[in-house]
Amino acid sequence: MDFSKLRQGEVVAVVGGLLLIFGVFYKWYESVSDLAVIGGVTGKGTYSAWDVHSIMRWLLIAAALAPIILAYIIARDHQLSWPRGQLTSVVAIAAIGLIFYNGIIDRPGDPSGEIELELGWYFAFVGAILMLGGSVIRQQETETRRKPPGTV
């Protein structure tokens, strides 16, 4: 493996993936009321995405692995049938959507107005944005092969 082949885009995306993994395990939500219920627990407390989201936690971990896999592919100089970084962009957009929806639009807990966002949610959100930014930088660095007119 030749890590000197990694460029700025991969490094930014990998840092974003690591930040996303850290964010999943750090506290996302804080219950500020004694009567609020989140993650099946009533009362005040702080909860991570790992504690609250049983399915989404695995999706976010898998999404965070995408830039690490991309860096491995580039370091090993494997050939791909699509531009490098394109799949990581799609995965990062999905992760941004999941994190945004569960933090801003439909916050878990009952009543959701008594649940506040904590630092872990912001770590995960920034990590997913860094993943997207790094993969877009990588896509711009590679040339896309154009086909001649009239071919499929």
Image: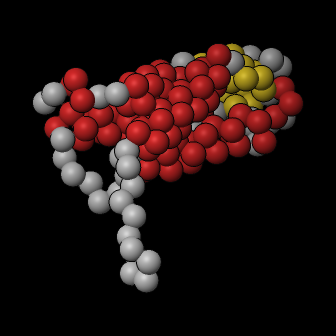
Nearer-the-camera pick, 29 or 34: 29
Residue found at x 27% / y 54%: 80
Vertical side of 123 occupied by 147: above or below = below
On screen, residue 120 versus residue 14, left or right, reads right
Rendered position, 114 above or below 90? above
Residue at the extreme left: 1
At 53% from the left and 34% from the top, the residue drawn is 133
Percent from the top left, x then y, of residue 30? 72, 19
Query: Can residue 50 be seen from the camera position used here?
Result: no
Who is closer to the viewer here, 20 or 55?
20
The answer to which of 146 and 152 lies nearer the viewer is 146
- Which residue sits at x=68%, y=24%? 29
How many marks overall? Answer: 0
Asked where in the image residue 65 lies, by quadrant, the reply is: top left
* Residue 97 left/right relative to 148: right
Q: Which x, y percent locates residue 9?
A: 42, 30
Residue shown at 13% from the left, 30% from the top:
1
- Does residue 27 appear in this view? yes
Could you say where residue 97 lies in the image, as x and y percent from the top left?
Answer: 64, 45
